[in-house]
Image: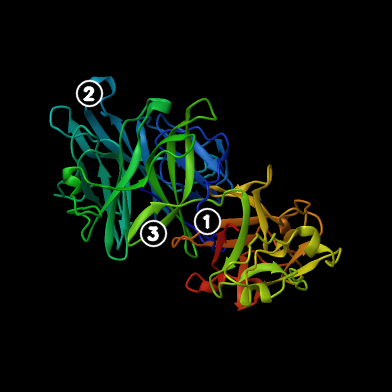
Amino acid sequence: MKRLVTGALGLCTILAVGIVPARAQLQGETFIHDPSTVTLSEGRYYTFGTRGGGLVSEDGWTWHGGPERPGGGVAPDVIKIGDRYYMAYAVGGGGMGGGHASQVKMMWTYSLDPKSPKFKFHDIGVVASSDGVETADAFDPAFLYVDGRLWLTYGTYFGPIRIIELDPKTGLRLAGNQPVDVAIDMEATAMMHRDGYYYLLGTHGTCCDGPNSTYHIRVGRSRSPLGPYVDHMGTPLLRGGGKLVISARGRNMGPGHFGLIELGNGVEKFSMHYEADMDRSGRSVLGIAPLRWTDGWPVAGENVAPGMYEIASERSGYALQLATDVVRIAFDARRSFMAKPSDPVAPIADQTLAEESIGWPQGSIRVDLGDYMNRPRQRWTIAPVPGAGGYFGAPFYSIVIAGTDRALAANAAGEVETVATFTGASEQLWQIDQLTDGTYRIAPKAAPGRKPGLALVAIGASTPTLAPFDPVSPAGRWTFRQP
């Protein structure tokens, strides 16, 4: 499993209801197969793939080639323990060349940056092997480090998925430790630990056939790292069970090689490769998606899709809106209370932007929270901003009053307002990340004169502001709902 832990800020909470997933793709040179854990080293993020090399990023959104990995082989994984980065990778096996004789090898370095003076890989040795005769395959290794113990899973469809325990001080296999079979009918496994459960994730389906690949990721859980692992229906993974986490999405086919990315403050994401990006010649590419948890099970989340929304506070249920005077819709109340059942009925038109905006100031306008009435001052258009970048699988967004260029912005007072024109300035760019409960956190890329780490927070039932995000409070959680 790929696991990254940082202290980065995610976004405020919003729930997208009945919408198409955003087609937000990572930018740059994203081509990779069998990506390792996304790992932070000396201020940059790294992932490594089959056949050596890998990708590096400053922000988790734009990726470039450059990392180096000796040893060749396939499907590496990386984990940091103390001041060392351990790397496991497989040589041979996997049915390549018609054989399953394979070894899982280990090495370590103090840095993943090839330009760093601390960068130098040291060979540790072989920690698992298969002889090509037994029904097992020492292939696709992945780490889990929890409670001071280091575990490694490996295996393919050729035989069982196995787990062994390593010494976190040396990276070597613990003396006398024997592999335990924990699953079948999967490969490219990963593990997580949460709320007393160990989760084993594996890739099912066919790989390496571009747009025809059927790779998808499934999961089971156990109270012990050694199993038995079962899915949500009680089917053991040793019998081929597994709850679906993610399958093909839109024009991205064959997700596999799960890797956990913990960004802190309730934001979790995961990396993978897609066997085929249909917009990039069907090549294998790195992907990152939100991770949600439902009834104790992980499932892929969604970025916010471009569209028009009500933005509702989880604290009060009120809607984010311009703090302008209410413009009434012309209506005779007697039509509701005194009309006869036989009287004719006809639709009442929604209030138009022209009708409500006639008294709006030309400059900045404050925002507040109020009862949702499907009025123009409460309708927001959300869209990725081309060329503005992003952060870990999600682009930076603009949030503007629908039908106008009036944009939500952070100001120097540490508050939120709308400005008359969207310019693309950092204080008008918004990071919107789905939280593990399905809501969203909304945060400005930058607030003028303010330290990083602020998010959109309802400090009262009707008062939004910018403040540090509290992951246990509903005040910073938001839902997006279509009008």
On the image, numbered disc 2 is attached to which residue?
99
**What is the x, y in percent for residue 92?**
28, 27
On the image, numbered disc 3 is attached to which residue?
293
* Among the 4 quarters of the image, the one containing residue 212: top left
Give, as a three-letter code, the residue at label 3. Answer: Trp
The disc placed on residue 16 is 1
The answer to whether residue 270 of the structure is visible from this angle is yes
Mark 1–mark 2 distance (CA, rounded to whole Å) = 47 Å
Rendered image coloring scheme: rainbow
**Disc 1 + disc 2, Cβ < 8 Å:** no
The disc placed on residue 245 is none
Of badges 1 and 3, the one in the foreground is 1
Label 1: state its secondary structure: loop
Of badges 2 and 3, the one in the foreground is 3
**What is the x, y in percent for residue 482?**
58, 57
Give, as a three-letter code, the residue at label 2. Answer: Gly
- The residue lying furthest to the top in this view is 97
Between 307 and 59, the one lying in front of the other is: 307
Q: Residue, x 81% and y 65% (percent of image)?
A: 364
Residue 314 vs residue 87: left or right? right
- The residue lying furthest to the front in this view is 342
Label 2: state its secondary structure: loop
The answer to whether residue 124 of the structure is visible from this angle is no
Label 3: state its secondary structure: strand
